[in-house]
Amino acid sequence: MNQMILPTDPHSTWSVAQVEALFSLPFNDLMYRAQEAHRAHFDPNVVQLSTLLSIKTGGCPEDCGYCPQSARHHAGVESEGMLKLEEVIAAAEAAKATGATRFCMGAAWRSPKDRELEPVFEMVKAVKALGMETCLTAGMLREGQAQKLRDVGLDYYNHNLDTAPEFYGEVISTRDYQDRLDTLGRVRDAGMHVCCGGIVGMGESRSQRAGLITQLANLDPQPESVPINMLVQVEGTPLYGTDALDPLEFVRTIAVARITLPKSFVRLSAGRQEMGEAIQALCFLAGANSIFYGDKLLTTGNPEASRDMALLEKLGMRPMGEDGPGLRG
Ligand code: SAM
Ligand code: DTB
Ligand code: SF4
C-alpha cells in the first residue's frame, strides 16, 4: 500500500497531497483502511442518532449558495419567528421516544444577538433536563456567547467549514473562512464539544474535497463530530442544477474522513433521502457512525424513522445508547 499515506496518529498534521493519495486508493483498499481505523476506536455496528429541529427558520442575511434559508435566494422558505419553548420540548420528547440520544437545534442566523440567545438558553436547559445531549447551530458566536451556552448545559456546537478554503469564495461571500475558524476556537475554549464538517457535491474538485478533509483533520484537537453533507439541491438556490456527485465518490469522502479523523463520530448527514440503501450501507462500511434521525432536517426531508430502523435492522446495526456508548477503549 502507498507508503506516502501516513498512519493515523490524531496529532499528526495531514497535507492535502496525503489526503488526495487516500482518495486515489483502489476502492477496496480505501474501505479496508477505513474499517481498520473504525474498528480501532468504535463498535462498527453501532450508530449514534441525532434529531434536528429548526427553532428559527428562514430570512437569513447570509448568501450561502446551497442554503434555502438565505433571504437572498428564492427557495420558497418563509421567514418565521422563533419556536416556543413548549414546541421545542415536545419535539425533543418525541425524538427521545423514537430513540435519538442527541437533540440539535438550528437557527438561521448570521450571528445571534445576546437577547436572541436568551430563549435558546431556556431551550437548552429544558432539553438537557430530558436527559438528552444538546447541540446548537446558530451561526458565528461573539466573545462570551459560547461560554454562556456552555454554562446552561450545551454539549455540542455545530459550525461547519463547509468546503476547502480555495473553493469557499465560490459558495459564500458574506463571511470568510477565518470567521468560521474564530467561532470554532471560541466553542473549543468554552469547553464544548465541536461538531464541524462540510458539504460535498457543490461542484468542487476531488482535490478540493481533500482540502476540506485536510482542514478538518488538522483542527487541534480534532472535532468530536464531523457531519459530511451531500448537497441537497433546492430549487431557487444558486447551487440548484449543479452536476450531481458520483455516490461512490461520496462514499470515498466518508472513508477518508474516517481514516484522518479516527476518533471522531463521522455523520452521514444531509442527502440520505436521495441516496439508496446500498450507498448508505457503503457509507457505514466506510466508517460513518452517526446519522440525522427523524423525517425532517431543517427545511428539507430525511428518511422516516421507521425506514431507518428497518435499514439498521437489515444491516445488523443498532442505535447508540441501547447497550452502552459504542466506543472502544
Ligand atoms: N446559520 C447557521 C450557520 O450557517 O452556521 C446554522 C444553520 S446552517 C443551515 C448549518 C449547515 O447546514 C451549513 O453549514 C451547511 O453545511 C448545512 N446545509 C445547509 N443547507 C444545506 C443543503 N442544501 N445541503 C446540504 N447541507 C446543507
Ligand atoms: C449539518 O452539517 N447538517 C445539518 C446540521 N449540520 C445543522 C443541516 C442540513 C440542512 C439541509 C438543508 C435543510 O434541511 O435546510
Ligand atoms: Fe444562513 Fe446558515 Fe443558511 Fe448560511 S447556511 S444562509 S448562515 S442559515
Image: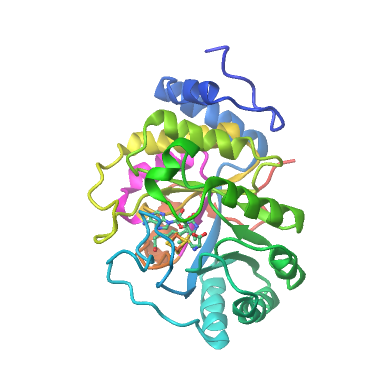
Residue at image point 42% right, 44% down = 169
Does residue 178 sit above or below 49 in this rendering? above
Q: Is 317 displayed left or right of 119 in the figure? A: left
* Residue 288 magenta-highlighted: yes
Residue at image point 30% right, 36% down = 246
- Pick the front one: 240 or 305: 240
Residue 126 drawn at (x, y percent) = 66, 80
* Residue 266 magenta-highlighted: no
Query: Looking at the rendering, which quadrant does residue 101 occupy?
Result: bottom right
Does residue 292 sit above or below 283 in this rendering? below
According to the image, what is the colour scheme of the structure?
rainbow
Q: Is 325 displayed left or right of 257 in the figure? A: right
- Judged from this view, the residue extending furthest toward the front is 174
- Pick the front one: 48 or 268: 268
Residue at image point 40% right, 25% down = 27
Residue 261 visible here: no
If the picture is divided into quarters, which one holds ligand 1? bottom left
Q: Count of labels shown?
A: 0
Query: Looking at the rendering, which quadrant does residue 250 occupy?
Result: top left
Write the start and end of the magenta stretch as one range: 273-293
Query: Looking at the rendering, which quadrant does residue 294 occupy?
Result: bottom left
Residue 239 drawn at (x, y percent) = 29, 51
Does residue 250 sit above or below 173 in this rendering? above
Residue 148 drawn at (x, y percent) = 74, 70
Residue at image point 64% right, 42% down = 42
